[in-house]
Image (cartoon, rainbow, N blue to C red):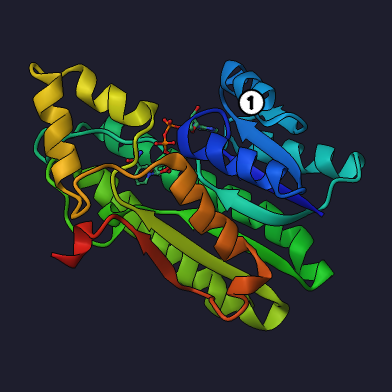
Amino acid sequence: MAVLVTGAGSGIGRAIAERFVRDGHEVIGVDVSAAGLAGTAAAAGSMHTVECDIRDERAVIELFAELDRSGRAVSVLINNAGIGTAATIVATTVEQWQSMFDVNCLGMFLMCRAALARMLPAGAGVIVNVSSVAGLVGLRERAAYCASKSAVIGLTRAIAVDHASDGIRCNAIAPGTVDTPWVDRILSDKPDKEQARRDMERRQLTGRMGTAQEVAAGVAFLASPEASYMNGSVLIMDGGMTAV
Ligand SMILES: NC(=O)c1ccc[n+]([C@@H]2O[C@H](COP(=O)([O-])OP(=O)(O)OC[C@H]3O[C@@H](n4cnc5c(N)ncnc54)[C@H](O)[C@@H]3O)[C@@H](O)[C@H]2O)c1
C-alpha cells in the first residue's frame, strides 16, 4: 500500500511527501527534476523516488510497470505536479497554453488512467487532484492556468461519477496562494518584488499566503478514511480568498 505523489521535488509536493512519510506510509515521489527529488528524499527520510515526466505516455506506462515489478501497489495517488504562466489570454502563446495543458491535464489523465488500471481490480483506491482557486474563479493574468485548473475539477468529478461504485474516491483540493518556489518565480520578473508579494498576500482574507504544510494537511485528510464520505468534491483551502 503506497502513496504516489507527483511533483514531489518542490513546494507543495515536497510537503505532501514529507507528511505521508511522517504519518508512516510508504511514499513514491515522482518528479521531472532529479535534484528536486533528492532534496525531498533528504528532507523526508525514507522514500522511493522516480524521475518521470508525467506528460510522456510511455514514461508513465513504464513508471507503473516498474512499480508492478517491484511489488509497489499504489493505493493513493496524489496528482500535484503543475505549472503556470502569468498572462492574459491576449498575451498567451499557443506554446504556453499547450505546455500548461500538457502538465496540468494530460499528465494528470495519464497518471489517473495508469493508477486506476491497478486500483479497479483491487476494488479500492483514492485519488487527490491538486487544482487551485484558479479552477473556481477567474484570476487576473492567469487565463490558461485558470482553464487548465477548471479542467482538473471536471476530470475529478468525472472519475468520481464513473468509479464510485468500484470503491474509488476522487477529490480535488483548491489552494489559494501558497508560499512555494512557484511564487518566487512569479515575483522574480516584477520591478517591485516586495510590493508584488504584499499584493499577493492581500488576496487572502488572512492577509498571508498559505504554507505548503497546510495544503499537505488538507491532502492527507482527503486521502484518509476520515474523508470516506467525500467523493467528487473540491476542498477549498484559500485563507478566505474566494469568500469575497
Ligand atoms: N503555489 C501556489 O500558490 C499554488 C496555489 C494553488 C495551486 N497550486 C498547485 O499546486 C501544485 C504544486 O505547486 P507548487 O507551488 O508546489 O509548485 P513548484 O513549482 O514548487 O513545484 C512543482 C513541481 O512539479 C514538478 N513538475 C513540473 N512539471 C512536471 C512534469 N512534467 N512531470 C513531473 N513533475 C513535474 C516540478 O519539477 C516541481 O518539482 C501545482 O499543481 C500548482 O498548480 C499552487
Residue 117 drawn above or below residue 70: below
Point out residue 52 in the picture as x, y percentages from the top left corner: 63, 30
What residue is pinned by disc 1?
43
Point out residue 61 in the picture as x, y percentages from the top left corner: 71, 42
Q: Is mark 1 within 8 Å of ligand 1?
A: no
**Residue 224 in which image quadrant:** bottom right
Residue 51 drawn above or below residue 202: above
**Apparent side of residue 81 relative to residue 114 in the rendered image (left or right):** left
- At horizontal 46% and vertical 33% (from top left) the residue drawn is 11
Residue 135 visible: yes
Kind of residue indicated by mark 1: Ala
> Which quadrant: the N terminus?
bottom right
Q: How many discs mark residues in the rendered view?
A: 1
**Apparent side of residue 80 relative to residue 208 in the rendered image (left or right):** right
Q: Secondary structure at mark 1?
A: helix
Point out residue 110 in the picture as x, y percentages from the top left corner: 59, 49
Residue 233 drawn above or below residue 71: below
- At horizontal 73% and vertical 37% (from top left) the residue drawn is 63
Residue 242 drawn above or below residue 5: below
Point out residue 72 in the picture as x, y percentages from the top left corner: 85, 46
Dot 1: within a 10 Å radius of its alpha carbon, few (fewer than 14), some, or many (20 or more) residues?
some
Q: Quadrant of ligand 1?
A: top left
